[in-house]
């Protein structure tokens, strides 16, 4: 049996008709790479449900690697998130009408959690293939950051989050995710060198 790579995206939110992150996860479902098979799934954009759904997927499929995708409509290109914070501060209501403010993701959890994916290597691989990509140090304070923080508490050897910009369609995202996953599988440890920012 092949090892599973779990790739999640999100359903549409904020009144949008589509969410290319979820569409890309669907496109990737069943893709085989380097002896692994991708399981794609779409998470609800609902604070009370998304982490539970993610945990159920991990329990059911026991992935060796988890990459969660989400849309950051105001950004461009691919953003490999390095850190999740234990804070929800919702600017808009979720798809169930909830808008938590100043709430922890996990009252018993750490203030922040770092990805266990080699994000510098993944961003470099994307750039080498002509994609616009970098490492990001804020996944926001909405459902994506919540899911990222929750993902880092799950029993998965390596996990992380990739925000995709509003300029990318689902097919481009799926192509980029294949490149990023291949880089993650090829790098047990991350590249050195800085990806830091001053802004
Ligand atoms: N983007 C939102 C939540 C779902 C999604 O695709 C976010 O960045 O939090």
Image (cartoon, grey):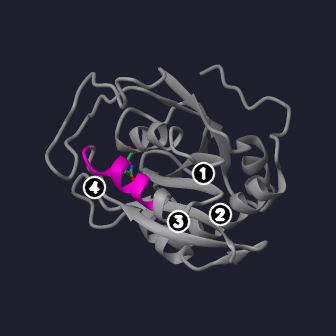
- Tag 1 secondary structure: strand
Q: Quadrant of the N terminus?
A: bottom right
Task: Tell me if mark 2 has few (under 14), some (14-19) or many (20+) residues whose alpha carbon lies within 10 angstroms of its own.
Answer: many
The residue closer to the viewer here, 97 or 5, is 5
- Tag 3 secondary structure: helix
Q: Is mark 2 within 8 Å of ligand 1?
A: no
**In which image quadrant can residue 53 be found?**
bottom left
Residue span colored magenta = 48-57
Return the disc, 1 or 2, that comes first in the chain's sequence.
1
Q: Which residue is mark 1?
A: 78
Residue at (51%, 24%) from the top-left corner?
112
- Tag 4 secondary structure: loop
Task: Tell me if mark 1 has few (under 14), some (14-19) or many (20+) residues whose alpha carbon lies within 10 angstroms of its own.
Answer: many
- Indicate the position of residue 28 as horizontal and vertical percent values: 56, 74
Q: Which residue is mark 2?
A: 176
Q: Magenta residues: mostly which secondary structure?
A: helix
Residue 51 painted magenta: yes
Q: Which residue is mark 4?
A: 13
Q: Are marks 3 and 1 in contact (CB under 8 Å)?
A: no
Residue 199 painted magenta: no
**In which image quadrant can residue 56 be found?**
bottom left
Q: Which residue is mark 3?
A: 61
Marker disc for residue 160? none
Q: Are marks 1 and 2 in contact (CB under 8 Å)?
A: yes
């Amino acid at each position: 049996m092949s090892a599973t790579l779990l790739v999640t995206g999100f359903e549409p939110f904020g009144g949008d008709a589509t969410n290319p992150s979820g569409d890309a996860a669907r496109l990737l479902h069943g893709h085989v790479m380097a002896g692994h098979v991708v399981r794609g799934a779409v998470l609800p954009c609902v604070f009370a449900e998304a982490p539970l759904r993610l945990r159920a997927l991990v329990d059911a499929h026991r992935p060796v690697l988890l990459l969660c995708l989400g849309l950051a409509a105001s950004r461009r290109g691919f953003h490999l998130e390095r850190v999740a914070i234990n804070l929800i501060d919702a600017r808009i209501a979720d798809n169930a009408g909830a808008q938590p403010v100043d709430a922890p993701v996990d009252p018993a959890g750490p203030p922040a959690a770092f990805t266990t994916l080699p994000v510098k290597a993944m961003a470099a691989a994307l750039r080498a293939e002509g994609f616009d990509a970098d490492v990001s140090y804020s996944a926001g304070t909405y459902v994506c950051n919540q899911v990222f923080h929750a993902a880092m508490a799950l029993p998965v050897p390596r996990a992380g989050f990739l925000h995709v910009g509003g300029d990318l369609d689902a097919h481009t995202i799926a192509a980029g995710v294949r490149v990023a996953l291949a880089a993650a599988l090829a790098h047990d440890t991350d590249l050195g060198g800085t990806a830091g920012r001053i802004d």
